[in-house]
Image (cartoon, rainbow, N blue to C red):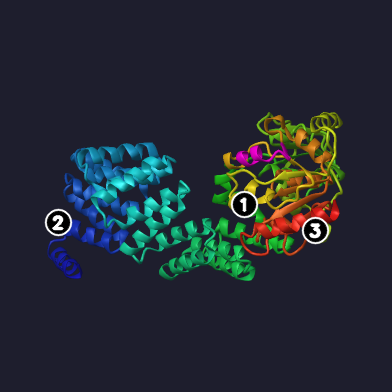
Amino acid sequence: MAEAQEIYRQVLEIRPKHYDALHLLGVISYQTGNLLRAVELIGRAIELNPKNAAAYSNQGLALQGLKRPDEALDSYDRALKLEPDYAEACSNRGNALKDLKRLDEALDSYDRALALKPEFAEAHNNRGFALQELKRLEEALDSYDRALELKPDYAEACSNRGNALQALRRLDEALDSYDRALNLNPDDAEAYYNRGLALQALSRLDEALDSYDRAIKLKPDYVEAYSNRGLVLKELKRLNEALDSYDRALKLKPDFADGHLNMSLCRLLMGEFARGWEGFEWRWKSAQIERQLGEKRNFTQPLWLGAESLQGKTILLHSDQGLGDALQFCRYAKLVSDLGGRVIMEVPEPLTVLLRNLAGVAQLVGKGSALPSFDYHCPLLSLPLAFRTELNTVPSFNSYIASNPGKVTNWRAKLGERTKPRIGLVWSGSAMHKNDRNRSIPLGTIVERLPGQFQYVSMQKEVSDADRETLISRSDILHFGEQLIDFTDTAALCELMDVIVSVDTSVAHLAGAMGRPVWILLPFIPDWRWLLDREDSVWYPSARLYRQEKIGDWAGVIERVRTELLRQL
């Protein structure tokens, strides 16, 4: 290539307007990564001969490499105007449209390329990527498989296939695809990174760490790999190493929101609240939070974080994450009201009836309903920052949510005569929760270890098929399912239990907020709010925490619960 490059340079010294020399030297510049030079040289060639479709297509490649997809699209369109059956230009046009997030149009371009050239492996691979972005995962998988039928040594398609399988939660198959990709291309940092994600999801943490390390060795500025490496180290309880890994990511990219967020959650877990709350505000710029919750709410009214006086003002406190978060942080409403502000609180619709008498709230609004006028706003999870909450200043109330007496009476009748101590059971949360694999427990794993001299009451509304089979086989567990209409029903059941035994879900927060005895079963590394190595909760005085002593060991946790039930009740 260097020899050809020198020949073309010599030609241009003699004939500065030699079309082929300009065009081909531009192509070599593109191939060697000198993209600006490529655009300039190919552009000069096009001025000499504006009728060559290949020149426009190659110019498009260089522009796309410079992240100028609009201009690249124009170049591909010019190429196709000259040569409508140019399959490569159709496929590359699809890539430009994909970069512009015009995915349906990109798909049309790939389909057009494949109509012209059905055995075009690269177009099948690119089509798969667009389908994956459109969440049409099974179709994406078919496209990757077709690309690999045509080109078995296509490492990129293997890696992309792994990504589709991972999105489908077919993790072992995804690993096989990544391994195949890496056998074909051992220098693919991205394949190592995605392999690390799959291993992390399978809780094969040491292997995940090794994959991230390999990715970083190949690509020393791999910001995302450093950040996810930190997450693995955190799960291994190597917290200072995790902080160091996040710090490396942020030195490479100081505005990397996910890195700031991950670091803040680690600091909060360690009880470093001041720095933790500050870093937690990066959640608004985090891609991972946006994927979970959608775009940030934009209000014309200013954000209140404790600086301005609220005397004579109205403030909107709005729920910005899950039901459990809303139940935990709605406690701050009274503190805000005590500052002289009139508090409007917006919460998820399932909580509106439960929280309608919450202290400090002048008006409660269900999320999605029209909002009244207000002067300031503050997300619920930003209130600890606004109040500069430290471990020793957590507003920890014995109870701040009450049950409905009428509902309690109704549920007392449904439960019937009390002949044994009643234990409420909550064993799983939403399968959509990012950490559900660590926090939820199969019901069978729990009940086979619990003593038989108690009456157990399922406080789950929805159950999996496997758990339903367990419920059918256990007549000593009362299950009401769809009779739990809303959280006021769950609150009434909490009132009637001697103890609620729960994994980390909204019901655990509800029981704690009501001041009911709740024993919370926690994984080896819990959510930040439960902190580390303590049996009590700074947020809920009535809670007792039962932690895994090693990763995945629910049997040991449940055995300790069994011992305590027999000792206390």
Q: Secondary structure at mark 3?
A: loop
Circle 2: residue type: Asp
Picture residue at 40% right of the left edge, 39% below the top: 102
Examine the rendered structure and indicate whether residue 486 appears above or below residue 501: above
Q: Nearer the viewer, mark 2 or mark 1?
A: 1
Q: Quadrant of residue 568?
A: bottom right
The quarter holding residue 523 reads bottom right
> Which range is magenta?
468-478
Query: Is 381 on the left-hand or right-hand side of 192?
Result: right
**Residue 536's mark?**
3
Residue located 59% across and 40% down the image: 464
Residue 124's spot in the image, x, y percent?
A: 29, 45
Q: Whole-Å distance between the Cαs marked 2 and 1?
A: 52 Å
Going from the N terminus, do you reach mark 2 or mark 3 first?
Answer: 2
Label 2 or label 1, whichever comes before in sequence order: 2
Circle 2: element type: helix
Q: Which comes sooner in the sequence, label 3 or label 1?
A: 1
Q: Quadrant of the N terminus?
A: bottom left
Disc 3 residue type? Asp
Inspect this view and state whether residue 303 appears: no
| Mark number, residue 20 | 2
- Viewed as shown, does residue 553 lie left or right of 540? left
Q: Position of residue 113 (x, y in %)?
A: 25, 41
